Image (cartoon, rainbow, N blue to C red):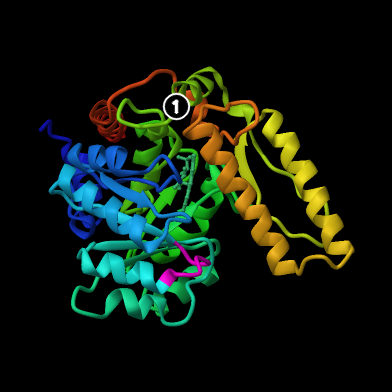
Amino acid sequence: MTDYPKTSRLMQRGTDFLGCESAILCGAMSWVSERNLVSAISNAGGFGVIACGAMTPELLDAEIAATKAMTDRPFGVNLITMHPQLFDLIEVCSRHAVGHVVLAGGIPPKGSVEAIKGGDSPARVICFAPTLALAKKLLRSGADALVIEGMEAGGHIGPVSTSVLAQEILPALAEDHLIFVAGGIGKGQAIAGYLEMGAAGVQLGTRFACATESIAHPDFKKAFFRASARDAIASVQVDPRLPVIPVRALRNKGTETFTAKQIEVAGRLDRGEVEMGEAQLQIEHYWAGALRRAVIDGDVEGGSLMAGQSVGMVREEEPVAQIVATLMAECEEALGRR
Ligand SMILES: Cc1cc2nc3c(=O)[nH]c(=O)nc-3n(C[C@H](O)[C@H](O)[C@H](O)COP(=O)(O)O)c2cc1C
């Protein structure tokens, strides 16, 4: 393996924690982060994470087993906190001795962190921290590491940019805790900057979504190669009563359909046909279905092309190992110049 001494030194805490060579996580991407991409990332020295999304425990069980058959290196599993079978999914991870569980989609419900860290095969817990106050709370509640993700990212996003989150959270917490930075990272120069600010490593999604090993449909990949940063737009909320988490995706007909979907669900809320919780769930189901249509079926018009602003830096299909090597070399070069 090529040496990246400066980068490796700054990534040391992250690589020790993850058990890999480069503290570069490929963030879980529903439908995209399955056995092929996840094993390729881990085999390339990064850290792959399976996106459980709405999978049943049986499906997750099969996906973990299949991933293990393709790599003997560590990888993680991303679980969505509002999944109705969250505790069964944790049990599946524990049975497979998965070393790292990432909890996404909100504050972990009571007992979930303990369930992951307890039992016969305790795992490390990684949580998303949207603010400094919540970051401190999550660490007190047992999170072993945090991901701070800015609004440049693809998929569901918060309201604050990566650069601001990094300035608020890294100086306060990074010396004593493991913080990984995500959102808008397309080149190693940006990784160098966050490592110098104290990050233990980084998480990228968009940059890996169209790798050779990604099973995403060729038309999904072509849409990424054509797009520039300004095409990756955040969804808008049409009804103040119906809070929807914004999603960043490439502008297409599906973006407009989502606006119509919100108006339809808000109407049902008005008529008392659905409760607020159910209304929000319908919106989330819409996204899951729309992303599947784009990633798996290649419906790039009607489906959801979730992508971050770094999509402009994704120009062609490249093997995962080449992407990781490029990021590491760029980071090393940037650190050498300082
Ligand atoms: C197509 C796509 C699907 C995603 N799905 C998920 C998901 O299911 N769960 C999750 O926690 N994050 C999801 N994300 C976010 C990524 O894990 C990652 O944090 C993000 O892409 C990092 O920002 P970047 O896109 O700017 O690199 C998704 C991102 C993309 C592009």
- Residue 270 showing in the rendered view: yes
Residue drawn 44% across the image and 65% down it: 172
Q: Where is residue 147 in the image (x, y as percent from the top left)?
A: 42, 57
Q: What amino acid type should be assigned to the residue bearing mark 1?
A: His
Please tell me whether residue 32 belongs to the stretch shown in magenta.
no
Q: Where on the picture, by quarter, is residue 38?
A: top left
Magenta stretch: give its range: 80-86
Quadrant into which the N terminus falls: top left
Q: Residue furthest right?
A: 271
Say which element carries label 1. loop
Decide which of 289, 135 is in the foreground and name it: 289
Label 1 belongs to which residue?
217
Whether 27 is drawn above or below 170: the answer is: above
Q: Position of residue 332 (x, y in %)?
A: 25, 33
Q: Is residue 218 left or right of residue 257?
A: left
Decide which of 65, 106 is in the foreground and name it: 65
Quadrant into which the C terminus falls: top left
